[in-house]
Image (cartoon, rainbow, N blue to C red):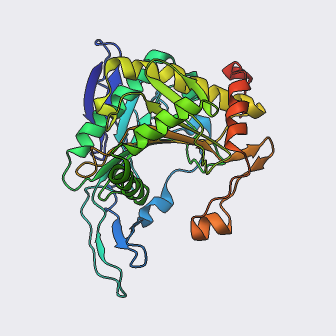
Amino acid sequence: MKRTITHLADGRELIYFDRRDDADRSAVDSRDLPPRPPASELRRDPLTGEWIAIAGHRQGRTFLPPAAECPLCPSRPGRPTEIPASDYDVVVFENRFPSFSTSPGVYEQVGGLSEVRPGVGRCEVVCFTSDHDASFSSLSPDKVTLVMDAWADRTAELGAMAGVEQVFCFENRGAEIGITLSHPHGQIYAYPYVTPRTRRMLEMAEEHAARTGGNLFADVLAAEREAAVRVVGENAHWTAFVPAAARWPFEVHLYPLRHVPDLPALTPEERAAFGPLYTDVLRRLDALFGVAMPYVAAWHQAPVRTGREMSYLHMELFSIRRASNKLKYLAGSESAMGAFVNDVLPEEAARMLRAATPPDNNKISN
């Protein structure tokens, strides 16, 4: 893998990840860009102890432009984009509209009981391919491995930044999910705190270890493999299964068989084995109803400084589509109380996914 660092016209960092050592990355960003926005601020909710990022500058971010104006496609004569090169394999760059950053800002207490502090951190965009009409499910195994290498690279670098407590790699796909750009891409958030979901899972892992002496995540994986009824697919290094207490209509978790804390800890063999299983699961999701499934794909990694021995790297993939013409909306119980109700039996979801025949990518309607 060749890794080339350059900078965009406003000073943001851009990194090319290439399979070929002779890739030419000398193109320069010629745009006249406005100054980078100030960092967001964090406000602590005194009722839950959770930190909320207030980032008013994100209201102006690009929203569903036509393909001819996509900012994630390669640049072409007369049409410069966020990627100066005329083609690329995988690209990572600092988000122009970040939720967290190292830019200076002014922070004042706002009254009440809410503590305020700078939203220090970093947000990056990961472009999986230069092909605007592709999808992650259509990537070749070696291309998925290159994406994983980029994720691992960024996890290690961002985790070493001052003030960063957790690194989160994810992809949002589909207008139903709320994407603002349709080009195949994901994001990376370097949080200045450990997220509420991770804190809760680590609390449960600590309770489980105190009670049984085992690792909660490893024991969940072992139990699902033994039960088998919710397993969707597996290979020598990974298992994909629908969790018994799935929140979402179609939800699949992918675990490496070996206990590792984060993406950088995976071996080359484990990284190479992930792509074929993951893209198969994605194609099965698309095959369920013959339409491109909206989804969120979320990597759960160990925090930078806490809970690393308890943590277990895994991906949680879920879709809000519950039928061919129905979506699951977060209504009163889920939105107000965080109490989920799932309309699809997890065992039935796993059966449907195992039975689905992955179609050719060009036969899926978007």
The quarter of the picture where the N terminus appears is top left
The number of discs equals: 0
Q: Position of residue 154 (x, y in %)?
A: 30, 37
Residue occupying the point 63% across, 59% down: 340
Which quadrant, please, contains the C terminus?
top right
Picture residue at 64% right of the left edge, 49% below the top: 248
Q: Is residue 226 visible?
A: yes
Taking depth in this image into account, of 152 and 108 the one nearest to the observer is 152
Write the residue at 68% across / 65% down: 331
Which residue: 59% across, 33% down? 227
In the displayed structure, would residue 129 be above or below residue 49?
above
Q: Is residue 134 visible?
A: no
Q: Quadrant of residue 68?
A: top right
Task: Specify the farthest residue to the right.
Answer: 325
**Res. 351 image quadrant:** top right
The spot of residue 42 in percent (x, y) is: 34, 68
Q: Nearer the viewer, residue 299 or 204?
A: 204
Q: Quadrant of residue 354?
A: top right
| Closer to the camera in the image, 216 or 345 | 216
Question: x, y (%) of residue 190?
Answer: 32, 50
The percent coordinates of residue 311 (x first, y second) are: 34, 44
> Of residues 93 and 67, which is closer to you in this image?
93
Side (left or right) of 151 relative to 11: right
Q: Name the outermost residue toward the bottom.
A: 112
